[in-house]
Image: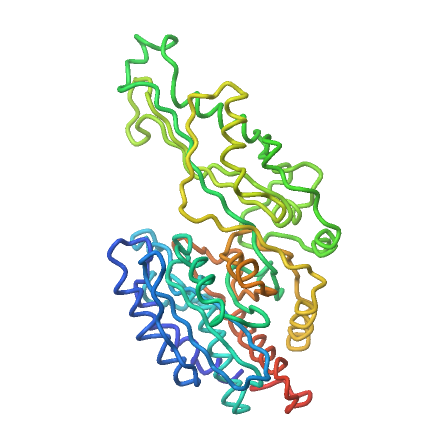
């Protein structure tokens, strides 16, 4: 790992973090496209990849497909990454830090995208480069798909995968995103929970009215909406809508989660009495559904006045596991609210594309193969999560392309992903580079290096 210790990964990452690839900005298209053409494509061409930009079916930022082909008789690995980031929130970072300039403090590399996802795909591409420099060939084919819209829901990705099935054909997806279970334990996850975002609204009248003159006479939109939410999820986070509850946790999933303990030093303390009763913390976040209030507004929170608010709104998020039918969610919520006397509360879907839940069986041969490689490289038995608690567009690969999907994250839970002061841990990045280099060596079907563990 001398290459890492000499600062080479950090040097590769610095110019990538400097690019403001915030996909939420209306004027970001040029910056997003430049990341693909000026940062990633030259790197790939130096590794023997042939790259092309392909139009997004939605008209948004194009996708990048790059392929290194070594032989028709060799297996193909599809890998995926995204180069867009969440808003920088420049003014909210701690003094001395910036989202667009990597600042190193001890083991932490601060900057927007260091953890999600520029740092992670830079590690993987660097591992490919190190293996090629060491061996001259991989012994398998690689196709890279990179998008620039994951942080806004991956618009067009599903349709793109349907259209480009032939170009994206592979034997397995191996990619990196999301956090490890903890900084000290290498992790695999095999899918992700799905996400269904929706809005609840109450609109009772045209204007607010004085609370002294009209209190007790006029319905309060905020009170109505608060009670409507309480009809969907109770005070301890248990889902009350029977149609939104998942099927029982499969035995193979329960076994895989038996030795999993969520949480991380430096992260928030887990609330033991929150969520579905009778489940372990791991089962609650990786094996069950959750319904969350992401935002709630009524009246004028910044400057309250003595008036009964006429309107209220809430942004809700439902994360769900395999076995739930996303097409039924909106109607189930509508029916439950109506049955509980909340017909005045509107329900509307707030995201154009809903990512479905996916989960590869933990006993799948590809899982065992990758896990064994990681253990050989690190000497640590990796945590195997049937699915990530968060959401990724894995359904495009698992459902549309029909691939087994194995994700190897290079971040950790307390990385401040999507928040100010996002950072990558150098020891995790260093180990991630070793893991990926070892795996790429192990995937060589020509068996030309025996038991060697690859580049140092």
Q: Is residue 196 above or below residue 360?
A: above
Q: Is residue 104 left or right of residue 187?
A: left
Please name whichever residue, 368 or 16, is drawn nearer the observer in this view of the structure.
368
Residue 252 location, x and y as percent?
A: 73, 55
Res 96 visible: no
Q: On the rendered image, what quadrant is the N terminus found in?
A: bottom right
The total number of labels drawn is 0
Please name whichever residue, 377 or 404, is drawn nearer the observer in this view of the structure.
404
Residue 456 location, x and y as percent?
A: 56, 86
Res 297 visible: yes
> Which residue sits at x=42%, y=62%?
160
* Residue 441 location, quadrant: bottom right
* Residue 122 location, quadrant: bottom left
Q: Is residue 214 above or below residue 5?
A: above
> Which residue sits at x=56%, y=54%?
192
Residue 351 location, x and y as percent?
A: 41, 45
Q: Is residue 95 above or below residue 12?
A: above
Please name whichever residue, 286 or 267, is drawn nearer the observer in this view of the structure.
286
> Which residue sits at x=54%, y=38%?
328
Q: Specify how the rendered protein is coloured.
A: rainbow
Residue 52 location, x and y as percent?
A: 36, 75
Q: Is residue 381 above or below residue 217?
A: below
Q: Is residue 372 left or right of residue 127?
A: right
């Amino acid at each position: 790992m001398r290459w890492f210790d000499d600062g080479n990964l950090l040097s590769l990452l610095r110019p990538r973090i400097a690019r403001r690839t915030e996909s939420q900005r209306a004027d970001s298209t040029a910056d997003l496209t430049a990341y693909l053409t000026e940062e990633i494509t030259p790197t790939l061409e130096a590794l023997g990849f042939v790259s092309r930009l392909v139009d997004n079916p939605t008209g948004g930022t194009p996708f990048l497909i790059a392929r290194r082909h070594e032989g028709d008789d060799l297996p193909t690995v599809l890998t995926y990454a995204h180069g867009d980031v969440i808003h920088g929130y420049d003014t909210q970072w701690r003094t001395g830090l910036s989202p667009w300039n990597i600042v190193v403090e001890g083991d932490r590399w601060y900057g927007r995208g260091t953890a999600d996802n520029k740092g992670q795909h830079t590690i993987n591409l660097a591992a490919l480069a190190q293996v090629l420099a060491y061996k001259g060939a991989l012994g398998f084919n690689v196709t890279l798909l990179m998008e620039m819209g994951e942080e806004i829901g991956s618009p067009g990705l599903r349709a793109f995968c349907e259209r480009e099935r032939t170009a994206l054909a592979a034997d397995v997806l191996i990619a990196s995103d999301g956090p490890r279970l903890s900084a000290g334990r290498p992790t695999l996850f095999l899918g992700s929970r799905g996400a269904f975002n929706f809005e609840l609204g109450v609109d009772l009248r045209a204007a607010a009215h004085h609370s002294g003159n009209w209190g007790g006479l006029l319905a309060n939109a905020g009170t109505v909406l608060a009670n409507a939410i309480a009809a969907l999820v109770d005070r301890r986070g248990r889902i009350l809508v029977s149609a939104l509850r998942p099927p029982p946790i499969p035995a193979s999933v329960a076994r895989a989660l038996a030795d999993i303990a969520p949480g991380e030093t430096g992260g928030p303390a887990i609330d033991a009495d929150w969520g579905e009763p009778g489940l372990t913390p791991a089962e609650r976040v990786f094996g069950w559904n959750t319904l969350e209030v992401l935002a709630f507004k009524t009246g004028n929170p910044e400057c309250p006045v003595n008036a009964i608010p006429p309107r209220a709104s809430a942004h809700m998020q439902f994360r769900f596991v395999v076995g739930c039918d996303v097409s039924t969610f909106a109607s189930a919520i509508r029916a439950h609210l109506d049955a509980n006397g909340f017909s005045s509360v509107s329900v509307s879907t707030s995201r154009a594309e809903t990512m479905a839940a996916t989960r590869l069986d933990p006993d799948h041969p590809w899982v065992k193969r990758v896990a064994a490689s990681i253990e050989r490289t690190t000497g640590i038995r990796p945590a195997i999560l049937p699915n990530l608690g968060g959401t990724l567009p894995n359904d495009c690969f698992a459902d549309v392309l029909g691939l087994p999907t194995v994700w190897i994250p290079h971040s950790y839970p307390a990385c401040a992903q999507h928040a100010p002061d996002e950072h990558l841990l150098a020891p995790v990045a260093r180990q991630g580079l070793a893991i990926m280099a070892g795996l790429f060596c192990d995937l060589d079907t020509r068996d030309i290096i025996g038991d060697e563990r690859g580049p140092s």
